[in-house]
Amino acid sequence: MTVAPHDDVEIRRLTVTNHGDQAATGVQIADTLPDHITVAAISDGGSESPPGTVTWPSFDLAGGRDEIAALRQDGVI
């Protein structure tokens, strides 16, 4: 995960990599946020539920490929 500043908010990027040569199916990404973080926006159909836990819909990931999920957050980390 990387956190990059952007104006008054932070962008959190979570990168998932399939190091194998075969597709991974049903891949899931979740991120538990610190208590002082407020979510401003979530990429690719992700949602925050329960509060403080961001999840994205499961997906398939081809061998040797990356997928990046991102969210914009308010607050200082």
Image: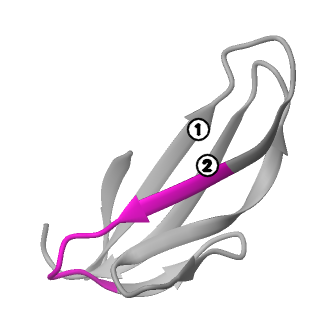
Please give the range of residues in magenta.
28-38
Mark 1 = which residue? Answer: 16
Q: Are marks 2 and 1 in contact (CB under 8 Å)?
A: yes
Asked whether 37 falls inside the magenta stretch, the response is yes
Relative to 61, is 1 above or below? below
Which numbered tag is attached to residue 69?
none
Asked whether 73 or 49 is in front, the reply is 49
Residue 55 in the figure: left or right of residue 51:
right
- Residue at mark 2 to residue at mark 1: CA–CA distance: 6 Å
In the rendered image, the residue lying farthest to the top is: 21
For the C terminus, the image quarter is bottom left
Label 2 sits on what residue type?
A: Ile
Give how far across and how far down residue 24 sits, in percent.
80, 31
Label 1 sits on what residue type?
A: Val
Relative to 30, is 73 above or below? below
The structure residue drawn at horizontal position 84% and vertical position 43%, both measured from the top left corner, is 60
Is the image coloured rainbow, by chain, by secondary structure, or in one colour? one colour
Asked whether 62 or 49 is in front, the reply is 49
Q: Earlier in the sequence, mark 2 or mark 1?
A: 1
The structure residue drawn at horizontal position 29% and vertical position 69%, both measured from the top left corner, is 33
Residue 18 occupies which quadrant of the picture? top right
Instruction: Please name which of the two marks, 2 or 1, marks the residue nearer to the observer.
Output: 1
Q: Secondary structure at mark 1?
A: strand
Give how far across and how far down residue 54 sits, in percent.
48, 72
Mark 2 = which residue? Answer: 68
Q: Secondary structure at mark 2?
A: strand
Give how far across and how far down residue 61 sits, in percent.
80, 37
Give how far across and how far down residue 38 sits, in percent.
30, 87
Asked whether 73 falls inside the magenta stretch, the response is no
Tell me the crowding category of disc 1: few under 14, some 14 to 19, or many 20 or more residues within 10 angstroms, Cα based: some
Residue 23 in the figure: left or right of residue 73:
right
